[in-house]
Amino acid sequence: MTPDELGDGVTAMRALLPSVVGPVAEALSASGPEAAAAAFHRLAAAELAAFDLDDEGFMDAICGAIELHHTSLVRPLLRVWTALRPDSSAAWTMTGWAHQVDGQLDLARSLLVRALDLDPENEDAALIMSNLPSA
C-alpha cells in the first residue's frame, strides 16, 4: 500500500516530518548536484519516512531568495529540484519565476508553459505568465 492509499492519517504524519530540502541542500553545497540527487533518492527509498519529500519544502526554501532577487543563491537547488522532479509543475514555476526576475523573459515563458502543461490549473504559473510582456 502506498502512503496515499493509507489516507489522511499518513498525510498528517508527513506534515510533522522535516523537509528533505535540508539534507539535499547540504549535499549540494558540500559535494554538488549528483550528491544532492543521491541524498534525495537515499532518503526517499528509506523504509521508514524520516523526511517530507513534497514540493512545499523546496518552495519554502526558494521563494524568499527569488522575491529578494537573489536567484543566484537558489539556482543550483532549482536545477536539482527540476532534475529530481521533472513532472513537478511547482518546480518549473519557481524556475520560470527566477528567470523572469533575472530578465530572461523568453526562457521564463517557456518554463512557465511547461509548468502549465503539467498542471493547467497552476495559478502561480498563470499569474507570473500574465505579468510577462507579450512575445
Image (cartoon, rainbow, N blue to C red):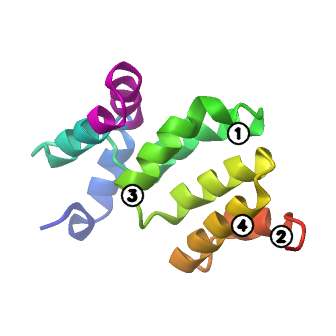
Q: Mark 4–mark 2 contact, CB under 8 Å?
A: no
Between 100 and 91, the residue placed more toward the observer is 100
Q: Which one is earlier in the sequence, the residue at label 3 or at label 2? A: 3
The nearer-to-camera label among 3 and 4 is 4
Measuring 85% from the left and 64% from the top, which residue is drawn there? Answer: 132
Between 113 and 55, the residue placed more toward the observer is 113
31 within the magenta span: yes
Disc number for residue 130: 2
Above-or-below relation of 88 to 119: above
Q: Which one is earlier in the sequence, the residue at label 3 or at label 4? A: 3
Quarter of the image for residue 105 reads bottom right
> Circle 3 sits in a helix, a strand or a loop, which is it?
loop
> Circle 1 sits in a helix, a strand or a loop, which is it?
helix
Q: Which residue is mark 4?
A: 109
The quarter of the picture where the N terminus appears is bottom left
Q: Which one is earlier in the sequence, the residue at label 4 or at label 2? A: 4
- Given the image, on which type of amino acid does mark 3 rest? Arg
The quarter of the picture where the C terminus appears is bottom right
What segment is highlighted magenta in the picture? 21-36
Residue 69: percent from left, percent from top: 77, 35
Measured Cα–Cα span from mark 3 to mark 1: 20 Å
The nearer-to-camera label among 4 and 2 is 4
Q: Which residue is mark 3?
A: 85
Q: Which residue is mark 1?
A: 66
Q: Which one is earlier in the sequence, the residue at label 2 or at label 1? A: 1
- Given the image, on which type of amino acid does mark 4 rest? Arg
